[in-house]
Image (tube, rainbow, N blue to C red):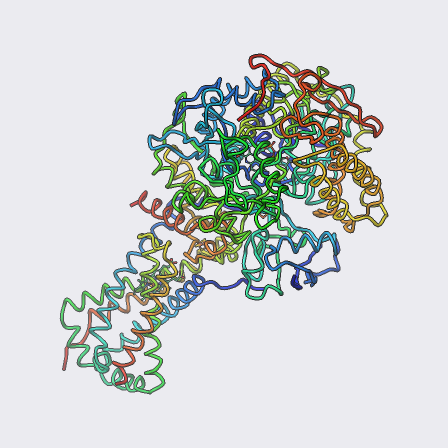
Amino acid sequence: MSFQYEGAGKSGSFAWFFQRITGVILFIQVLAHFYIAHNTWDAGHDWATIIARLSNPYMRTFYLVFVILGLYHGLNGLWSVLRDYHMSAGKRKLLFGLVVTVGIFIGTLGFITMLTLPAVQ
Amino acid sequence: MIIKHDVVIVGAGLAGLRAALEASRNYDVAVVSKLFPTRSHSGAAQGGIAASLGNVEEDHIDWHFFDTVKGSDYLGDQDAIEYLVNDAHPAIYELEHMGCPFSRTPEGKINQRKFGGHTKNYGEGPVLRACFAADRTGHMILHTLYDQCVKNNVRFYSEFYVTDIIVKDNIIRGITAYDMEGGEYVAMHAKTVMFGTGGYGRAFKITSNAHANTGDGLGVVLRAGLALEDLEFVQFHPTGVYKYGILVSEGARGEGAYLINNDGERFMEKYAPKLMELAPRDLTSRSIQTEIDEGRGINGENCVHLDLRHLGEAKINERLPEIRSFCRKIIGIDPVEEPIPIEPTAHYSMGGIPVNVDGEVLADGKSQKVEGFYAAGECSCVSVHGANRLGTNSLLEAVVFGRRAGKTMVKFLNAKGVDKADLPEDQVKASFDRIEGFKTRTGEEKVGTIRKELQQVMMTKVGVYREEKGLKEALEKVRSLEKRFEKIKIDDKGMKFNTDLTEALELDNLLQFAELIVSGALNRQESRGAQYRRDFPKRDDVNWLKHTIAVKKDGKIQYDYKPVVITKFQPQERKY
Amino acid sequence: MIQVKVKVYRFNPENDQQKPRFETYTVEADPKDKVLDLLHRIKWEQDGTLAFRRSCAHGICGSCAMKINGANMLACEANLKNFKDPTNIIVEPLQSLPIIKDLVVDLKDFFKKYEIVKPYLINKTPPPTKERFQSPEDRQLIDEATWCIQCASCSTSCPSNWKNPNFLGPAALLKSYRYNFDSRDEGTAERIHVLDTNDGVWRCHTIFNCVEACPKDINITWHISQLKKKLVSREY
Amino acid sequence: MRYVKHYGTWGYILHRLSGLALTGYILIHIYLVSGLHNRPAWQSEMEIFRHPLLVVLEWCLFSVVVYHALNGLRIFIIDYFNGARYQKQLLSAVLVLSVILFAAMGAVMFI
Ligand SMILES: Cc1cc2nc3c(=O)[nH]c(=O)nc-3n(C[C@H](O)[C@H](O)[C@H](O)COP(=O)(O)OP(=O)(O)OC[C@H]3O[C@@H](n4cnc5c(N)ncnc54)[C@H](O)[C@@H]3O)c2cc1C
Ligand code: HEM
Ligand code: SF4
Ligand code: F3S
Ligand code: FES
């Protein structure tokens, strides 16, 4: 067995704690999202409806937070799954970099979408 | 392979670990055990550990002293008992300071319960004296001690089976053993050796003891030509689960459980009107056996009932959870709803390796020490239990005398300096050859069959009640089994975890001293404590107020005797 | 009396050609017998080479944990009447540990993890002449955790442990709880950091296999949760 | 032979699979939503999503969300509110609620 203490910074208590916190907030947001976006079939798919909704600054904030929390929670979850497997330090760093890159890339994309939406008509 | 240590302790029960802890503060200690330490049978002890702390009601060291002497049927050595009851206080407080999780009183003190034979004011009525941790007292102490040994970096050799001690010119040189995992033979070269190898309940068919309790220490000592003391005194615990022998602790009766016969009668009224169910074990076992023999067993079977139902579920869960759990799991009875069928079960050996109050082994049982050789716990005989042990006194003995032996070893090592007596190679080789011999023996006898026959005859003829005829038959049977054992053959010839070999070696030990138990019982023509002879139903202080010392010379048993140490309490008639 | 077919995992590393295999024995049994009784009957009457650990025979020493019909339990407590089909029993060693022989596994790693959590009371304040006081409530807090018999059923049933053998595992974590939550203990600061690593407490994903496997009915997961909370509250 | 799967094991496997699936989905989802900039392209894309098979798939996705969300709550209760003592009852509740919500969503979507 090669058990080693890795130092508190890398411990995982932050990841664990914020997985719960974000999870609980997401729970509320997901309910809200489904109510808002999918109360009828068209509500989620029609361009005009969506744009009209998102022109409301509160809505926009809501979805910006949703994107951040969703990405953080999902990718943190993915990372926690990966950490269950025993791997070399190099491989671990590589994978971590990959997960973070994906997060930043998609996160930026989501932000750009939300902040630069065209107006209706 | 030869391994060197200052101190080698054989056995990792309460006695072994407590001694290891003491010695490990100053010396390099190795603990050798055929089981992983926390698997030792000390962990099965349920009821409690005695000390007259007086946490719940008034109690005095002197009362405890008296009860132990009386319980021993005046065969206990009173100098040793005095150490036992005095050291009880520091010993228990030390355990608590190490973290042992005792049950607590509302004020936060160690809680105490009643136990058989422990009385107030020299026999007036039961007293709350047994410190306990629910019904897991032994388990808690064992684990606490092991944890402390981990802290002190004690070196453990777990799953090493010890086969012999190496003694020459009355000086201990070391031990031989084999590593069960790899099968390698090892000799351990040490300045001091201590035995805490536990009891031998497995010589009997119905027993509360673990499969590993085969009294190896006694076999080893006999083979080395040393003496054993008082082996005829075998305690039968009154409440073993019918057919299984698993113990239902006296703690159950301490909490108020009843013993009931087929007529629904609390029969202990007849036998011990004052203490009732809390009479000492020898008396209670005989009472139960009498009920059964006279046809008042439940449905005519070999058992009576132990009834806990009136205690209520809450109290059972709080005080006796482990008992409830194994009753439900193993026998399929919930003591909250049904009484438990019980019968007497072979439980404890009062006799053993003769030692003085400092734990030093006596080669001839009297005064000749074996330099550097110590023993404590159930395998030893100081003798604090005399002819009958009181419940909760044996955990106490293991802790108190383990501690004392540890201290003595440290003193001895301080005085002795660095050099070890050399390890005679011929003896080591002879011991290894003996083990190897088991693998090459060719015959048609099986270990399992011989052991079963031995357990059967010991149970029926050397049990709660004994008489000359039965004992003679038993002796013959044991001798014939010894003959048959020479033609034994084991299936497993391999090196790795060869339990077939271990069981053969264990049986060899069992047979060695079983003969001593039987002939000792035959020899002692009186009834005292756990030894009850139908043909001699009275205690005979004129002829038998003395310890039996037995040695085996060229396969023949020789008897010798030594007087009982009496300081404060003169023998009286023993009534409860 | 019933006839029980017992399929036993056999492996002897000394015999190189022998791959692990199952051997089936037919044993006479009482419907209330325990699996340990069956194994004894096999060993004593049919095949003495079978190796397994056991001692107390009533669930207190922790020697005889093994996988029976696919789940970890103590052989000495595994009552035939509790199996759906008591006439077909499959016995295997504990999963994921190196096998020494047949049903005997190598527990060295298991106990190394035990030692790593500092399983002993740490209290530097000199003790009083009598006992340290502890209220029944404080005693109750650690009660369940003290029942553990170190049988290893839990750790070898934990999927997280199978994937990552370095995970401390439920048994060691439970032990850590035992001392960290003892009102008499002062060692949390020097003890708790070993839990706060990738192979520590965070590898527990509340799978509850350990709880199902524990023969002492300890809710290990509950205790691990308390440790997690303690770690989090220490930092935030 | 494999280890038997207890109740809690299934809870864990499903949570993990659903979590990973959702993560995959959310990545794709954010990427697709960035298509909102181009109205015609968006509308034609949405036409594809009207395919019955994809509608059913979307419904299934909802079940994944519901299970993961509810079980996530269960884990939270286990960690913070002694839920470890009632994990089985909690899991039963999660499963029952998931099925009910799944059916209800079906009703909204198809009726
Ligand atoms: C079911 C039960 C309940 C009991 N309840 C109580 C109670 O409530 N109160 C009380 O005071 N007493 C009780 N007793 C008695 C008490 O538990 C024992 O007398 C005491 O624990 C003995 O401790 P020990 O250290 O001498 O031996 P054990 O704990 O039996 O330890 C023996 C050690 O020796 C080792 N060993 C043996 N042979 C070999 C060998 N050949 N090679 C290497 N190692 C070897 C074993 O591995 C083991 O570690 C009870 C006994 C039983 C059976
Ligand atoms: C809606 C409410 C949600 C709640 C309450 C919730 C809760 C949780 C919790 C508590 C965990 C931790 C499990 C553990 O550590 O064992 C977790 C894990 C995870 N979650 Fe969520 N979550 C939610 C939504 C989401 C969403 C929207 C995603 C996808 C983006 C997601 C992806 C994941 C992943 C990948 C894991 C890791 C799975 C694992 O460790 O087995 N979750 N979730
Ligand atoms: S927690 Fe339970 S399963 Fe795990 S080692 Fe202890 S007793 Fe065995
Ligand atoms: S099975 Fe393993 S993951 Fe946690 S709840 Fe038990 S330790
Ligand atoms: S033999 Fe002791 S736990 Fe099964």
From the viewer's side, name the closer residue of A19 and B324: B324
Residue D37 is situated, as x and y percent measured from the top left of the image, at 23, 78
Tell me the quarter of the picture where residue B514 sits.
top right
Give the camera-side residue of B54 and C233.
B54
In the rendered image, the quadrant that contains the C terminus of chain C is top left
Front residue of B471/A49: it is B471
Residue B191 visible in the current orientation: no
Q: Residue at x 46, y 28 (%)?
A: B126
Query: How many marks are shown on the rendered structure?
Result: 0
Q: Position of residue B84 (x, y in %)?
A: 54, 21
Question: Is B501 on the left-hand or right-hand side of A107?
Answer: right
Q: Is residue A22 left or right of residue B296?
A: left
Seen from the viewer's position, the closer of residues B448 and C230 is B448
- Any part of residue D16 in sight: yes
Residue B331 lies, with reference to residue B187, above or below; the image says: below
Q: Is residue B68 above or below residue A86?
A: above
Above or below, comparing residue D23 to residue B107 in the picture: below
Q: For ligand 4, which image quadrant applies?
A: bottom left
Residue drawn at 52 percent across, 38 percent down: B267
Tell me residue B204's x, y (percent). 68, 40
Q: Residue furthest top?
A: B567
> In the rendered view, would you say C143 is above or below A39?
above
Q: Quadrant of the N terminus of chain C?
A: bottom right
C157 to the left or right of A61: right
Q: Where in the figure is residue B377, as x and y percent of width and height?
A: 61, 28
Which of the 4 image quarters holds residue C13? Answer: bottom right
